[in-house]
Amino acid sequence: MIRRPALMAVCSLLIGSTVLRAQVPLPGQNRTAGNNFYISGKIIVPDSHFSDIFEVLLLQNLEQVVQATVADSQGRYRFTNLARGTYFINVKLEGYEEVRQRVDIGAVAENIVNIIMDFKEERIVKPPADFSGEDVEVVDLSELERTYPSKITDEVKSADKDVRDGNFVKALPRLEALVREAPDLYVVHRLLGTVYQKLGRVRDAESEYKTASDLKPSSAAPLVNLGSLYLQEAEVSAKQGSGVVRTILNEALGSLNAAVKLKPDAAFAYYLLGVTYYRSAFYEDAEDNLKRAMELAPSLSHARLALANVYIKIQEWSNAVAQLDAYLATNPKAESRTEVEAVRSKVAQRSQARVR
C-alpha cells in the first residue's frame, strides 16, 4: 500500500530537491571587499552509478551567465573571483529537474552550497483523449421495435452504426432529429451525448447525458459518460487555475461514485475514478480504484499504466517497475512500447539506487 503523508515526507527528504548550504568564513575574516568571494560545493546525483562530469553555470538576473565550470566525477565544483551580489547556480542533467539555486554572497568569503538533484517526474501515460467509447451499451433493438415505429428504429440503428464507425458528423443530424421526434428515448440522448463529446461540445454533451440518466435512473452508463466528460474538461482547463480544475474533478468524482453504486462491477468507472483521484492528489484512493479496475477487467491496460503513474508519483519505484513489466508483457505490440520501455529503464535505475 502507499505510504502515508508522514512517510512521503521522509521520502522527499531522501530524494527530493534539497539544498544543503553552509557559509564558512575564512580564518579571522567576516567580510571581504572586491572580487574575492567564492562559491563551492557538491552536486549530489542520487544514482550510485553516476560518475559523469557535467557543466555548472553561475547566473545573474536568472539568465546572464557569469561563469561556467565543470563538476568532477564526484560532483564537486567551484566559482572564484566573485563580487558581492545575488547569483543563481544552474544545473541541467537529463532525467533530473533543472536547478536554479539562489545564492546571496557578501557576508563571508567562501560560500558552500551543496545541491541534491531531484528526479524529473515521469508521467507514463495520459488518459485517452476521451473515454466514451469504452463503456458502450448494446442497443436493445427488439424493445425499441415494440415501442416505436420502424421509421424511428431504423434511424436509431443507422445512427448507432455511425457512432460505432466513428462517423460522428454524419450521426449528428440524425440524432438531433430523433431527439425532436422521440424526446423520451433514452438511447438517443446517450448516443447524442457521445457525439457531442467527440465533437468537443462539452455543455451539450453534459445536458444529453443528464437527460439520459433522468430517463433511465437504473443505468450507470450515462454517469460513467459524465465522469469521462468532466475528466476531459479538467484536462483542457488546466490554464484556468487549480480551483477551476478541482471543481471539475469533484464533478467527475460525484458522477463516477454514483455509477459504481449502481453497477459495482463497472470496471471502466473504477479506472476513471483512479485517474480522477490521481489528478486530485489522493494517491491511496487512486491506487485502490485502479487495482479494483484491474481485478474486474485484467485486459484494461490503461489502468496498469495509470497505476504505474501513481507509484512513480510517490516514488514507489519497485511497484512502478512491476506494473510497467506487466503492461509490456501483455501488450507486446503497443504503440507506446518504446516510450514505456524507456521510462521503465529509468524507473528501474531509481529503484536500484534506492536499495543501495
Image (cartoon, rainbow, N blue to C red):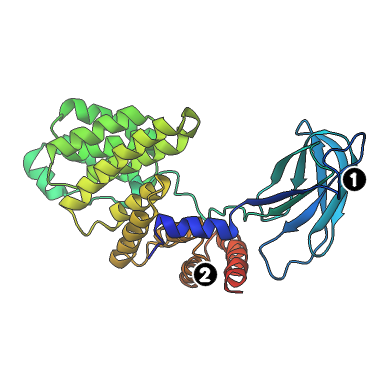
The C terminus sits in image quarter: bottom right
Task: Judge from the rendering whether residue 9 lies leftward or rightward of residue 121; answer left or right.
Answer: left
Name the amino acid type tagged 2.
Answer: Pro
**SS type, badge 1:** strand
Please rate how many residues cluster around mark 2, counting C-alpha atoms within 10 Å: few if below 14, some from 14 to 19, many from 20. Answer: few
**SS type, badge 2:** loop
- Asked whether 258 or 159 is in front, the reply is 258
What residue is shown with label 2? Answer: 332
Residue shown at 15% from the left, 30% from the top: 182
Above or below residue 269? Residue 255 is: above
What residue is shown with label 1? Answer: 80
Q: Quadrant of residue 179?
A: top left
Name the amino acid type tagged 1.
Answer: Thr
* Mark 2 → mark 1, Cα distance in angstroms: 54 Å
Q: Position of residue 49 (x, y in %)?
A: 72, 70
Residue shown at 34% from the left, 45% from the top: 132
